[in-house]
Image (tube, rainbow, N blue to C red):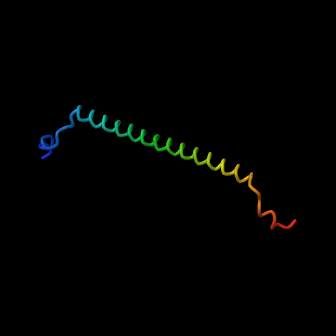
Amino acid sequence: MSRDLPHIMPSPQPEVEEIFVTHQTTHQFYHEVQTRSEFKQHCEWYHSTSQSNRQDMERMRGEINFFQFFRRK
């Protein structure tokens, strides 16, 4: 029976292995591109949010602090 196995399951062809290697490499490349793109979007969002927060803080520093009237000294 073991003599029949080579006829049932042929050995993989070298070109098929190349195709799988190419597919895996391509998949990894696109995954890396997507990951970097998402990271870049996150960095841009973080930068714009922090800039907005700094502007809000500067505006708040220029406003009158009403709570100081309620504090006891």
Q: Which of 24 and 58 is in front in this view?
A: 58
The answer to whether 12 appears left or right of 38 in the picture is left
On screen, residue 71 above or below 58 = below
Residue closer to the observer: 31 or 44: 44
Q: Would you place residue 33 above or below residue 53 in this image?
A: above
Q: Is residue 48 left or right of residue 28?
A: right
Give the image quarter of residue 34.
Answer: top left
Q: Position of residue 26 (x, y in %)?
A: 34, 36
Q: Residue at x 19, y 37 (%)?
A: 11
Which of the pair 25/39 is nearer the observer? 39
Q: Identify the residue shown where x is 13% and y is 44%.
A: 8
Q: Name the quarter where the C terminus is drawn.
A: bottom right
- Provide residue 41's location: percent of width, then percent of height: 49, 44
x and y, in percent, of residue 55 in the image:
66, 48
Number of callouts in the render? 0
Percent coordinates x, y for residue 58 in the rendering: 70, 49
Tell me what residue is drawn at x 16 percent, y 42 percent.
Answer: 9
Name the image quarter holding residue 29: top left
Residue sitting at the far right: 73
Q: In this view, does 67 lie to the left or right of 39?
A: right
Of 9 and 68, the residue lying toward us: 68
Instruction: Determine the residue positioned at 80% across, 62% down.
Output: 68
